[in-house]
Amino acid sequence: MTDETTANLILGDMDYEMPTVVGTESEVGLDVRKLRANTGMVTYDPGYGNTGSCSSAITFIDGELGILRYRGYPIEQVAAAASFVEVCYLLVYGRLPSLGEYDDFRNALTRHTLLHEDMKKFFEGFPPNSHPMAILSSMVVALSTYYRDTTTEADINRNIIRLIAKVSTIAAFSYKKSVGQPFVYPRNDLSYTENFLYMMFSVPTEPYEVPPVVNSALNLLLILHADHEQNCSTSTVRMVGSSEANLFASISAGISALSGPLHGGANQKVIDMLRKIRDDGGNYQKYMDMAKDKESGFRLMGFGHRVYKNYDPRAMLLKKSADQALAELGVDDPLLDIARNLEEIALKDDYFVERKLYPNVDFYSGILYRAMGIPTNMFTVMFALGRLPGWIAHWREMRDDPEGKIHRPRQIYIGATERDFVPITER
Ligand code: CMC
């Protein structure tokens, strides 16, 4: 790089000058948009680990220092003082709401929690043991058959509010479906998080009284999951949305991306892993050895991150909160001890130290969900509920970006060169 504004790429006798893009935190990107047109070359970056796919003003992460900020506000401060609804407003609209704006937003969310009665029939069609993530993504794309695609700001905004409100109802209904219990309708006198817990855990014979500690734990979990810049599911939302697919279709695609075990599905896998270690009589070494053996196909779930090469600040907050919540609820979960021991062993192990593999957000979130009574197959749905405002904010930002265009990466073709087609009768 010659200075802050241009970089030179020298290849053979070619000297190509590229502009740079500098972010507000001094991150520098090489602008390769005209590289192919001017040199015939593309950049090669499988998994996009080193590709800036957009500029964004939503979330800043410094993976080396373990920093996470939403719209500039440090996650520690947000987690200590905000409600999840306030964070939704901050991420989607780009600023903190005034008291009046907050009340209006909260009321709007409360008024849109009901699902169209016909949508209940969709739930009947899913097999009894359906994974709630599959139900969630199906139901979210189904919303687009009720609420039409729109381009006016006011209508988009209404669809955003509908989505945030209805996803909590869909998530709770998908759980009820999976356990064969009747759906519990939302209540307008409860907060967003209380209402979700009420719909999840009430039965017709006994309404659920939400313990404040469970409500605070849910608020924290949703806030910590609310955005994480260009992760797999968010990039999927942007990718799908870049074709001008509607909000519901784009978010449904993000939910599908989140369901994989290397992404949001990891929280469920962490609990499976901790259970196995427990059932193996606490044989940590066996699992450490397997994690280090590339042939085993096993990884320590809840460890490692594409961006964090330091302790994930979300994992730090969750570890503390899991300790407090379990103590307050009087829950003695042996899996918490196993998690703590495993963390201690891994953080001292050369393999993990060299590769800078630390616990990520999924390592302790499952323990907290368990203490709240949330079943394992709902963990990733909880992640989706939290990530929703982030996805929406990115969808909106992508849509409003004057430089935005349909996402269409290039490739390096490595298949057969031209050859003659052989008719089926001659093969
Ligand atoms: N256990 C054992 N080895 C690991 C782990 C792990 N959990 N994570 C990474 N490594 C090793 C990996 O084998 C590689 O070793 P080497 O350099 O010898 O080939 C090195 O560390 C770098 O790993 P990578 O796969 O190149 O890193 P990545 O950025 O592509 O993957 C990751 C990031 C999160 C997919 C990966 O760390 C992983 O699979 N972790 C376990 C699954 C998990 O916890 N996922 C949740 C991520 S956080 C929340 C979310 O995004 O949804």
Image: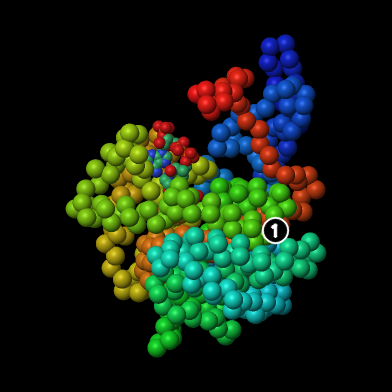
Q: Is residue 230 visible?
A: yes
SS for callout 1 = loop
Q: Which residue is mark 1?
A: 246
Report the label total: 1
Q: Position of residue 408 (x, y in %)?
A: 68, 39
Lateral position of residue 315 relative to residue 79, left or right: left
Q: Nearer the viewer, residue 37 or 3?
A: 37
The residue positioned 64% from the left and 56% from the top of the image is 250
Quarter of the image where one finds residue 129: bottom left
On the question of residue 78 being in view, the answer is no
When asked about the image quadrant of residue 41, the answer is top right
Instruction: Name the outermost residue toward the top.
Output: 13
10 Å crowding of disc 1: few (<14), some (14-19), many (20+): many
The image shows residue 281, relative to residue 386, as above or below, that is above
Residue at 65% over, 47% down = 239
User: Looking at the image, what colour scheme do you see?
Assistant: rainbow
The quadrant the N terminus occupies is: top right
Q: Is residue 417 above or below residue 321?
A: above
Percent position of residue 169, x then y: 54, 73
Image position, residue 229 (x, y; %): 60, 50
Occupied quadrant, residue 352: top left
Q: Is residue 96 left or right of residue 65?
A: right
Cβ of mark 1 under 8 A from ligand 1:
no
Q: Residue at x 67, y 27 (%)?
A: 42
Under mark 1, the amino acid is: Asn
- Please state which of residues 115 and 264 is positioned toward the viewer in this rendering: 115
| 202 left or right, relative to 34 | left
Residue at image location 47% in from the left, 66% down from the top: 126
Give the vertical position of 399 relative to 408 (above or below).
Answer: below
State the image coordinates of residue 332 (x, y, percent, origin top left): 28, 68
Q: Quadrant of ligand 1?
A: top left
